[in-house]
Amino acid sequence: MKLLLTCEHGGNQVPKAYRDVFATAERELKSHRGWDPGALSLYRALLPISDASYHCTVTRLLVELNRSARHPRLFSAWSRRLDAHQRNEVRARYYDPFREDVLRTVTGWARSGQEVLHISVHSFTPILDGQVRDMHVGLLYDPAHGRESELAARWKLLLQATAPDLIVRRNAPYKGTSDGHTRALRQAVGPNYHGIELEVRNDLLADPIATERMARVLMPTLAVLSGKA
């Protein structure tokens, strides 16, 4: 089995050409709306067991890599202020190459008969709209995809055996069938592709020590799941 890691929301950087548009977005850029805090560090900690990896550090408020190209929220309230030509430039420079590179890699593996496990690394905020999320890790997948369901269920068991106090939920805090990168790849690649979005509560990734602690739980279990151990 080939293991692919991606991190779509790894940073909150604003390219120089678009800084004027984001002059009023400082608070949003620093928040979970602008990026997934801690996700990039966790992704990097998991790289030793991956067969390929792709990440982006440009803010999701410029273009949302985890949405389909026709999704109404591909561009944020700030990037929608750009004219059509500028938005096309943003998509051509940041969105299309990322999506195309990942698709090319996954398609190549799948066509050669390899099973592909794609882990899309994200973080989530502990409180959203006043609601406390009483969980530590979420595994998002498509319940209609039998092999994907099996992998997610097994990973949850491995995680709980390794760290009994860790609260792991499947298809929470979001649904794995929502519009996103893994869903697009399921549709494009076929049955050899299995995509799981890994969601870790961002206060558990607040500093290098916390991230290392989480990686020590995730890496060995993912290695077993993907046949790397």
Image: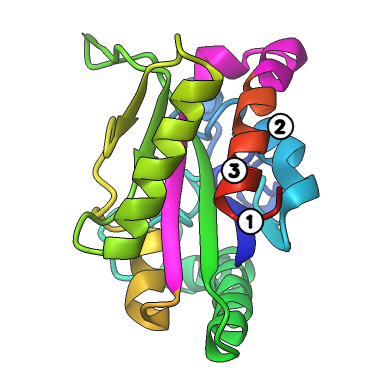
Q: Position of residue 29 (x, y in %)?
A: 53, 29
Identify the residue shown where x is 47% and y is 40%: 198
Q: Observer-nearest residue: 122 or 194?
A: 194
Q: Is residue 190 above or below residue 16?
A: below
Q: Amino acid at mark 2?
A: Ser
* Magenta region: 193-213
Q: Position of residue 137 (x, y in %)?
A: 43, 26
Residue 12 appears in the figure = no
Q: Which residue is mark 2?
A: 41
Q: Is residue 32 above or below residue 170?
A: above
Q: Estimate the spatial distance between the alpha carbons at disc 3 and disc 1, rounded to whole Å.
A: 8 Å
Identify the residue shown where x is 28% and y is 58%: 179
Q: Earlier in the sequence, mark 2 or mark 1?
A: 2
Q: Position of residue 192 (x, y in %)?
A: 44, 77
Q: Which residue is mark 3?
A: 222
Is residue 188 covered in magenta? no
Q: Earlier in the sequence, mark 3 or mark 1?
A: 3
Q: Estimate the spatial distance between the alpha carbons at disc 2 and disc 1, rounded to whole Å.
A: 23 Å
Disc number placed over residue 125 in the picture, else none? none
Q: Which residue is mark 1?
A: 227
Identify the residue shown where x is 53% and y is 37%: 22
Q: Estimate the spatial distance between the alpha carbons at disc 2 and disc 3, rounded to whole Å.
A: 16 Å
Q: Kindly state the secondary structure of the residue where label 3 is placed.
A: helix
Q: Earlier in the sequence, mark 2 or mark 3?
A: 2
Q: Kindly state the secondary structure of the residue where label 1 is placed.
A: loop
Q: Amino acid at mark 3?
A: Leu
Mark in front: 2 vs 3: 3
Dot 1, crowdedness within 10 Å: few (<14), some or many (≥20)?
Answer: few
Q: Kindly state the secondary structure of the residue where label 2 is placed.
A: helix
Mark in front: 2 vs 1: 1
Q: Amino acid at mark 1?
A: Gly
Q: Observer-nearest residue: 164 or 45?
A: 164
